[in-house]
Image: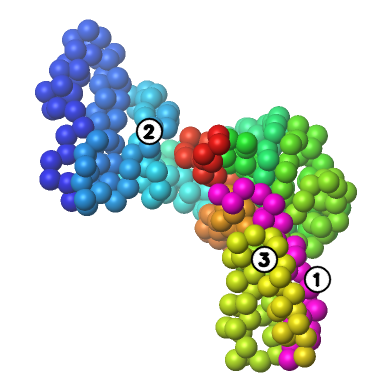
Amino acid sequence: MVGNINCRTNSGISNEILEVIINHGMEGLPRAVEIIYNEAMKIERSRHLGADHYEHNCERTDYANGYKPKTLKTQLGQLNLNIPQVRQGDFYPSFLEKGCRSDRALKAALAEMYVQGVSTRDVTKIIEDLCGFQVTSTEVSRATKLLDEEFEKWRTREIGKYEYLFLDARYENTRNAGSVVDLAVLCAIGVTESGNREVLGVSVKLSEAEIHWREFLESLQKRGLHGVKLIISDAHSGLNAAKKAIFPSVPWQRCQFHLQQNAQSYIPKKTMKKAVAADIRSIFNAANREEADRLLKINIEKYSSIAPQLSEWMGENIPQGLTVFSFPAEYKQYIRTNNLAERLNKEIRRRTRKVGIFPNEASCLRLVTAVVMEISEEWLVGTRYLPKIDSE
């Protein structure tokens, strides 16, 4: 714990607050509260880090990483806050987190009510109980419409040059034509030449069929996506054909982690699993492509008699995970797998599981868009995803 956290001296803060009140009277109260909130958040961050600002401390757990602006509506009016950021761990001011939890609870409760077919009157009562204010069905519809308009602008915004394109899909239970179906949620993440990441788009479709992946990739291209040097993904159904049609000259890096998992299906004996995993890992961890190809050839021959299906599978699939050797070695651990997209999907699932079954496709797309927008905004003000190379 930090022994003496003092982002600014108490007298300095007090003087600034008094100056605001003296000069502006009660009209200056919102600004005074802004000062108090901003200083309180700095102190809370310091406690989270285990060290004061610029303090050298062996107990420090992380480092400060600037601020993110946020507008907070209160009874005093609109407050302009600066949310302290950290480099690696999760940190969010406790008094704001409470508001976020309430907001998520409200969305989940509303979704649950609609799924269960509860009347509008009962839905309104839930809102009143959670938020403490009255709303009408008209206001709920208007709010939903405004959200949809905002999210549609984000999904159709202009994008530009991204050198690395991560693609992934997951499924959400949704009511459709009187039954519950699994809707495919398609996501695209781009990494710029400077190493920064951003969620480029999201789409909800009935399946991962080629036509749906193709429409999604075409929409990215029409919005200005260009300069892609590498596509990173798993071998999703329909994706291979779609990316060949839309990005025919862009190489593909198949996720090494999923290749390791897929290999387990071709191992005839459980006792062989550890050895096979180690052999595949040695190929992926080779010093260069030539060495990886040499080790792959050795292992294909090694398993040709004792596990012929595995041997054949390795020859056809493992090379798809070796494209990464053609790119900077400093980037290897960041683009060899689809972990970036997997982590995004994990966060989406953390939010959507509170709903259970979405009442319709629009509801699913609305919440998924809200989640990825929030994450993408955090990425844009955070640290770069790819490390700097000395030649930069």
The tag earlier along the polypeptide, 3 or 2, is: 2
Q: Please tell me which of labels 2 and 1 falls first in the chain.
A: 2
Instruction: Using the image, determine if residue 16 lies above or below residue 320.
Output: above
| Residue 189 higher or lower than 302, as above or below | above
Residue 164, image quadrant = top right
Instruction: Identify which residue is drawn at 65% across, 34% down.
Output: 154
Amino acid type at circle 3 is Glu
Does the image show residue 194?
A: yes
Which residue bears the numbered disc 2?
66
Residue 131, position as x, y percentages in the image: 42, 43
Relative depth, front residue between 237 and 100: 237
Residue 256 — which label? none
**Secondary structure found at label 2:** strand
Q: Residues within 10 Å of mark 2 (few under 14, many from 20)?
A: few
The rendered magenta stretch, by its main secondary structure, is classed as helix
Mark 3 or mark 1, earlier in chain: 3
Q: Nearer the viewer, mark 3 or mark 1?
A: 3
Q: Where does label 3 land, which residue? A: 291
> Which quarter shows the C terminus?
top right
Colour style of the rendered protein structure: rainbow
Instruction: Identify which amino acid the numbered label 1 is placed on.
Output: Glu
| 327 left or right of 208 in image | left
- The CA distance from mark 2 to mark 1 is 47 Å
Identify the image quadrant of residue 260.
bottom right
- Marks 3/2: CA distance? 43 Å
- Point out the frontmost of discs 3 and 2: 3
Q: Amino acid at mark 2?
A: Gly
Q: Position of residue 174 (x, y in %)?
A: 69, 59
Horizontal and vertical percent position of residue 76: 33, 24
Q: Label 3, label 1: how many angstroms apart (C-alpha)?
A: 18 Å
